[in-house]
Amino acid sequence: MRINLIYKGSWTFYVALFALLLPVFLLGYHLFQATDGKFSLPHDDAFLQLSTAKTLAFSHIWGISKYNFEAASPSLLYPLVLAVAFFIFGAHIVVAILVNTALGIVLLICIDKWLKRNGIRPLTQLFILLAVILLSPLPLMVMYGMERTLLLLLAFLTVSRLFDEWDQPAFSRRTLIYSALLVATSYEGLLLIVVACVLLIWQHKWSRIFELILWALLPMIIFGFIALSKGAYFFPTPWIIASGAQFSYDWLIGCGIAVMVPLLSRTRAAQRPAQWMVASAGVLIILLFTRNVYAARDLSRSSIGVFRQEYHVGQFIHLYYNKFSIISDDIGILSYVTEGKYLDLTKVNPGLIHLMSLQSFRIAIVSDTYEHSMPEEWTKAVSWNIPGRDPKTIFFFTKEPYAAEYLIARMKEYSYFLPQEITIQYFYIPTKQAE
């Protein structure tokens, strides 16, 4: 169906579009000012997705490095979308923000079309669109640089199609494809599929349950067997460790929005229930608005913190260890700015860390938040002390004396580029100075 937004009845969409783009612009401008125009993202997982997209776009390998297959991203579809954008525009962090902004606009277009098609009055349309933006919160989803905006878009498309076709003999192919893409964006999407299947069980629609589950699980099954054939795990790594399998607050709110918007549209014939539901949404906005304001402050603080603590580590490694094998407990930004092999300490059994010594790793970068100690054969050579609201110390380890001497020499060269508040401490004494 053709999308026509250039007419008088689309004023609600343009108001909502402004409500989305203004905070995105303000947040982006603030981050550019705070990070000297370099830009940053608030979470290490976001850089893992960018690394996967970068490797896929230019090396045609699924992983954070071009040397081996690795499902470090929790999403299957989002890195593919980013890879296309990176291939066209280049691998820049801001490209992820622009992609997410475009996805957010498409979401508003889809919701706007849905509301108009179901006869919702303009003021109610505007209220619902603003509720989507504020409750998600959609501007923060855009700035996360992750798959959340795409996930919310496909959640709405899937749920709205299920509502449309619930009383029909069978789901259309488009609806089933949407369900598959939803799960491919993130396995969290299975939550909506499970809810739909429970409702179908209540109505004894067994064939439709089987069809919906089959299509939803298809991306997981296909990718799982491909991963096994490449020597990786069946599930993406973030879903194997406990912390990666938790449903995020933003996604749970997004699920509610994906269900509530079609539910509001079903009340076309009875405006009073619709108004009551809109009033309830207004109460939720008031309750959650304060939380989302704090979330915006936290996003800005986290993005600036990642820049202050990780950006210079990435630049140092890019200059002197660009194609070396690296060990770290924060591998995200390192995998994005360098081209070597990586070992993520957060995904390694502490009892097996000593096996690192048998491999070709030359340097290890460990923060003071890492809960385990390094093997005895690794020598602590240098540390960076980064002050601030969230102070952090980063330690640099090497295995051989000559590697430690090389690290110290390169560190003294790079010290001229470090901010003045970062202090360097040297632990290893070169052989000549020791004599």
Image (tube, rainbow, N blue to C red):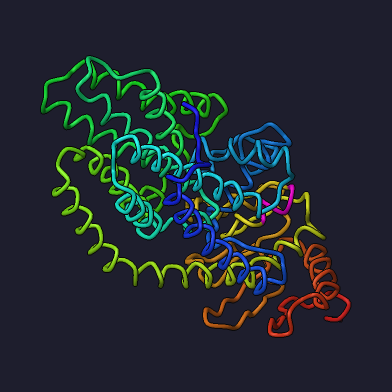
Quarter of the picture holding the C terminus: bottom right
Nearest the eye: 78 or 95: 95
The quarter holding residue 202 reads top left
- Residue 177 visible: yes
The relative height of residue 176 versus residue 349 in the rendered view (above or below) is above
Q: Is residue 336 magenta?
A: yes
Is residue 228 rendered to the left or right of residue 40?
Answer: left
Residue at point 21% right, 39% down? 268
The relative height of residue 112 versus residue 182 in the rendered view (above or below) is below
- Give the prevailing secondary structure in the magenta stretch: helix
Q: Specify start and end residues of the magenta stretch as a single range.
A: 334-339
User: Residue pushed farthest front?
Assistant: 8
The quarter holding residue 116 reads top left
Image location (x, y in percent) of residue 403: 79, 62
Q: Is residue 72 magenta?
A: no
The quarter holding residue 363 reads bottom right
Residue at point 35% right, 58% down? 135
Nearest the eye: 360 or 431: 360
Is residue 380 rendered to the left or right of residue 232?
Answer: right
- Residue 351 visible: no
Residue at point 86% right, 73% down? 413
Is residue 322 rendered to the left or right of residue 268?
Answer: right
Image location (x, y in percent) of residue 385: 64, 80
Nearest the eye: 407 or 2: 2
The relative height of residue 20 versus residue 227 in the rendered view (above or below) is below
Image location (x, y in percent) of residue 282: 25, 62
The relative height of residue 226 versus residue 418 in the rendered view (above or below) is above
**Count of number-bearing discs:** 0
Image location (x, y in percent) of residue 38: 71, 64
